[in-house]
Image (tube, rainbow, N blue to C red):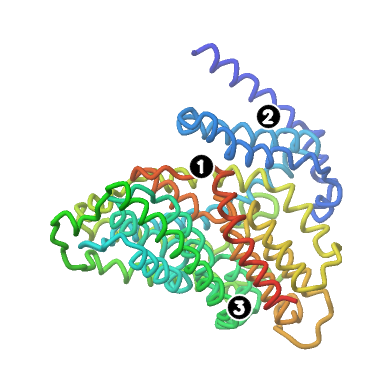
Amino acid sequence: MYNVGKRWLGIFTFLVFIMTSPVNVYAAQKIDESDLGNILPLYSCVPFIGMLLSLALISLIAGEWWEKNKQYVVIFWCLLFIIPFGIKYGAGLAIEQVLESIIGDYITFIVLLFGLFCVAGNIELAGDLKGNPKMNTLIIFLGAALSSWIGTTGSSMILIRPLIKSNRWRGRRKHIIIFFIFLVSNIGGCLTPVGDPPLLMGFMRGVPFFWSLELFPVWATNVALLLLIFYVIDSIMYKKDMKDGIKPPHEQGKVFKPIRLVGAHNIIFLVVIVTAVILSGVLPSLPAFIDDQGAVKGIHIFGEVTFTYPAIIEIAIILTVAFLSFKTTKKEIREANNFTWGAIEEVAILFVGIFITMIPALLILKSHGAALGLDKPAELFWITGALSSFLDNTPTYLVFMTAASTLGAKVGIDTTLGIIAQKMLMAVSCGAVFMGANTYIGNAPNLMVRSIAEENGIKMPSFFGYLLWSVACLIPVFLIDMLVFFM
């Protein structure tokens, strides 16, 4: 084992030497970063595709092995991108691209999820709920309504455990979690910039904070249709459970305890986190945070990579809040919630691989997105949504928001990118937020909810199994969206 470790260390050292040789460092200096998307070959996206297929197939074929070794799979695909990229374009550019992804996107992304995960885990909805179709539909509706105001992650983490607890007696439960992901972890977050990161990016580029409320008719249509579908499916499954002799607790003589909120002071911490997110969108526009060249001030890391002061402030606030939440909450509440670190650990590992390996795909998309000839709302709705299902929906939103701003609209939303016709911005916004529900990796809360469900004994569908549910239940609703709102 020691010799194997030495061999891998030797190989890695040799590859680093090749990447950092003067020839390759010089090569990085000769390439304009803005041209990268035009010169990168499509096969540079292979590590990203491999990352997605690993998540989809290895976890299905060898689930136990995947759980123990997924971090090594992530490292493999990351190195398969970084090393060839560094050899061809120079170590400097490779390091800069990776740091830009990690410092500029991943750290704030994972710290926000961590903060919401910690604080929500310290809130317990104690008491007993009847796990029947009516109660389940009500919980999912409340979650969908809450998601726009405390974020899809916050709403998901608060309500997923009570939902699982109330349905613990059920034999058929995976469909409940699937629709929870559809509505609470994704679609519910479209009404404010706090709800989902793409809308926050729009707010940072001049879209008014409350403009997202224009999406309410689309939100209401999707929530109503999907809740109706869910109620029908859950009623069928409920009857099958009863037919199999699985009786709900109240029919077994159990006395239900009244509902009460324990650890309610953590709601204050949730508000602070939401405020920190809003600040991260407001501070970069203030003169105190802008240098003479118009760039946001921060700590220089490497090349053009800067760790901005607004991002540092946001991170500091969120981590402080998470610490205070743990210090001021009794551990019995976390025990009652079956709180573990597994869900956030899985998201942190998988998404660092996704963020790094998708760099070529995003660079290519940024270079060619505006030239795709997309000038109709329906087209932007589907292309933004399709890519948001597999890529991070925030940069995808920005690419097609930029594309929409180049269409020469005279009337619409006045942003820092230009005027965007309202229906076009609605299409991009809904595509990015709604279709994150199409896959487990479309939005980070999806994986977190799945992980928590499996920790509690619910066998969730595989990557492709979940995709079948989304195709069957979501795509027909999105077709209605297109016909009603985006034609």
Q: CA distance from mark 2 to mark 3?
A: 41 Å
Rendered residue at 26%/63% (across/down): 129
Q: Does label 1 or label 2 sit earlier along the sequence?
A: 2
**Can residue 208 be seen in this snapshot?**
yes
Q: Does label 1 or label 3 sit earlier along the sequence?
A: 3
Rendered residue at 63%/67% (across/down): 296
**Label 2 element class:** helix
Crowding at label 1, few (<14), some or many (≥20) Cα neighbours within 10 Å? some
- Residue 94 lies, in percent from the top left, at 71, 42
Q: Is residue 338 above or below residue 267?
A: above
Crowding at label 2, few (<14), some or many (≥20) Cα neighbours within 10 Å? some
Q: CA distance from mark 1 to mark 2?
A: 23 Å
Give the labeled residue for mark 2.
Answer: 16
As shown in the figure, which amino acid type bears the numbered disc 3?
Pro
Give the labeled residue for mark 3.
Answer: 287
- Residue 394 lies, in percent from the top left, at 63, 61
As shown in the figure, which amino acid type bears the numbered disc 1?
Ile
Query: What numbered label is drawn on residue 486?
Result: none
- Residue 291 lies, in percent from the top left, at 65, 70
Rendered residue at 63%/64% (across/down): 476
As shown in the figure, which amino acid type bears the numbered disc 2?
Val
Query: What numbered label is drawn on residue 349?
Result: 1
